[in-house]
Image (cartoon, helix red, strand yellow):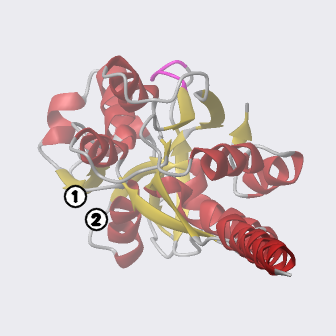
């Protein structure tokens, strides 16, 4: 009789352990994940739309964005800021992180292409304006990205250098911390004109494109993306990176004016 009781107790113990294991698995599988994504300010609108679609398909994942200039985001990552993925508006910042060994091997990819344009307020009564005409006395303030950390500012300086007018442009320049600040200054009329990406101009009804940068006047504008080596959620990070580049989202990027690689 004692042997029977011992056998029953042992069997119940095993059953309890088994049930506990079964109950634990769903909790691990369905754990909530915060995916931290650093992305260039010019990607704000399209990335928010992509993230909303991803979260709908993956309810346990919350995509948390840090939008800003690629240079500032690069520095934040180098200083240890929590980041799972980085979407840069230029190769320079991604190259720096790769050189420091901060990227997850095999995850870097060139994602998008953009172009530089000159914008003016939509209600501006000025005739068509060109990059070469910005040295005129009727142009007082030109909004540009801060060239040390804002890629669009770097591209703008390349354009003005190629035209031989960088110094007189610098005398009129007001520098924004990212491309969206440059856009905002032109929208409000605080600047007579500004240099942004074509995609930023496309999302605003308060500005119009006055001119495109001359062909060959700046380096190709390529947006690379990669997962960080120290990502706390590598499985979800890789999945989101692949999701961003799927066929549906390629069409979405095109709708926002990007050229997809």
> Tag 1, which secondary structure?
loop
Pointer 1 local density, CA inside 10 Å: few below 14, some 14–19, many at least 20: many
Mark nearer the N terminus (2 vs 1): 1
Residue 190, quarter of picture: bottom left
Residue appearing at x 73%, y 30% in the figure: 261
Q: Residue furthest left?
A: 171
Chief secondary structure of the magenta portion:
loop
Question: Is residue 261 visible to the viewer in this orientation of the structure?
Answer: yes
Pointer 2 local density, CA inside 10 Å: few below 14, some 14–19, many at least 20: many
Q: Which mark is residue 141?
A: 1
Near-viewer residue (246 or 211): 246
Residue 52, quarter of picture: bottom right
Residue 214: image location, x then y, percent: 52, 28
Q: Is residue 77 above or below residue 140?
A: above
Would residue 193 appear left or right of 36 to someone viewing this image? left
Residue 153: image location, x then y, percent: 32, 41
Residue 151, quarter of picture: top left
- Say which quadrant the N terminus sits in: bottom right
Residue appearing at x 68%, y 46% in the figure: 258
Please tell me whether residue 217 belongs to the stretch shown in magenta.
yes
Mark-to-mark CA distance, 2 and 1: 5 Å
> Tag 2, which secondary structure?
loop
Q: Which residue is mark 2?
A: 191
Is the Cβ of the residue at disc 2 closer than 8 Å to that at disc 1? yes
Q: Which residues are magenta?
A: 216-220
Residue 8: image location, x then y, percent: 84, 78
Near-viewer residue (169 or 6): 6
Please tell me whether residue 232 belongs to the stretch shown in magenta.
no
Near-viewer residue (206 or 107): 107
């Amino acid at each position: 009789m004692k042997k029977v009781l011992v056998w029953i107790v042992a069997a119940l113990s095993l059953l309890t352990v088994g049930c506990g294991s079964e109950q634990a698995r769903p909790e691990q599988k369905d754990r909530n994940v915060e995916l931290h994504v650093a992305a260039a300010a010019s990607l704000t609108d399209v990335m928010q739309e992509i993230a909303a679609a991803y979260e709908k398909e993956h309810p346990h994942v919350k995509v948390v964005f840090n939008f800003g200039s690629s240079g500032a985001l690069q520095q934040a990552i180098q200083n240890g800021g929590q980041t799972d993925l980085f979407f840069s508006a230029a190769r320079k910042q991604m190259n720096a992180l790769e050189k420091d060994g901060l990227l997850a091997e095999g995850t870097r990819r060139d994602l998008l292409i953009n172009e530089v344009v000159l914008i003016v307020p939509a209600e501006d009564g000025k005739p068509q304006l060109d990059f070469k005409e910005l040295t005129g006395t009727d142009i007082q303030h030109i909004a540009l990205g801060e060239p040390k950390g804002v890629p669009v500012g770097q591209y703008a300086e390349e354009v003005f250098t190629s035209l031989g007018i960088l110094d007189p442009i610098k005398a009129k320049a007001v520098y924004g911390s990212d491309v969206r600040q440059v856009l905002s200054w032109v929208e409000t009329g605080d600047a007579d004109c500004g240099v942004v990406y074509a995609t930023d101009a496309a999302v605003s009804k308060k500005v119009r494109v006055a001119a495109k940068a001359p062909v060959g006047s700046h380096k190709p504008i390529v947006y690379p993306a990669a997962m960080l080596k120290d990502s706390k959620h590598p499985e979800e990070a890789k999945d989101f990176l692949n999701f961003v580049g799927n066929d549906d989202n390629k069409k979405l990027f095109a709708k926002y004016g990007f050229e997809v690689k």
